[in-house]
């Protein structure tokens, strides 16, 4: 009997609206595009993508190049 694994996946809630995401040089303005792309990703790739959404930067997942600009944090560290 096969063992059941809960699979990580992207949801609309995990992709915040004030984050700018570029995929292969094009700005993604529809979250469904990323959700559809993530269906072929491994669990590790999805976890990595979620971390990069918070951190920002350039990276590659699932053969696609991403550039993420995270939201500006207005809180002061002083």
Image: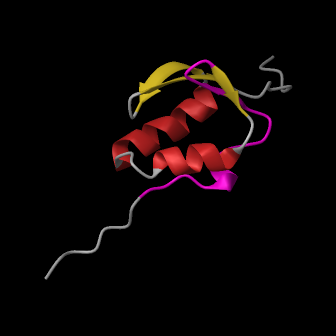
Q: Is residue 48 left or right of residue 23?
A: left
Question: Which quadrant: the N terminus?
Answer: bottom left
Name the residue: 65% across, 23% down.
26
Question: Which quadrant: the C terminus?
Answer: top right
Which stretch did the figure color magenta? 8-25
The number of numbered discs placed on residues in the rendered structure image is: 0
In the displayed structure, would residue 66 be above or below residue 18?
above
In the displayed structure, would residue 48 be above or below residue 13?
above
Q: Is residue 65 left or right of residue 63?
A: right
In the displayed structure, would residue 42 be above or below residue 56?
below
Question: Where does residue 25 sit, x and y in percent of width and height?
Answer: 61, 18
In the displayed structure, would residue 12 be above or below residue 16?
below
Question: Where does residue 11 sit, x and y in percent of width and height?
Answer: 61, 55
Q: Residue furthest bottom?
A: 1
Q: Is residue 21 visible?
A: yes
Q: Is residue 14 located in the magenta-colored stretch of the structure?
A: yes
Q: Quadrant of residue 70?
A: top right
Question: Where does residue 42 sit, x and y in percent of width and height?
Answer: 34, 47
Q: Quadrant of residue 47?
A: top left
Question: Where does residue 59 sit, x and y in percent of width and height?
Answer: 47, 21
């Amino acid at each position: 009997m096969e063992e059941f694994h809960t699979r990580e996946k992207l949801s609309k809630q995990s992709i915040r609206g004030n984050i700018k995401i570029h995929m292969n040089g094009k700005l993604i303005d529809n979250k469904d595009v990323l959700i559809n792309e993530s269906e072929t990703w491994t669990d590790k790739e999805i976890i990595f993508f979620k971390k990069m959404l918070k951190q920002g930067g350039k990276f590659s997942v699932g053969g696609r190049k991403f550039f993420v600009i995270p939201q500006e944090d207005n809180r002061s560290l002083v």
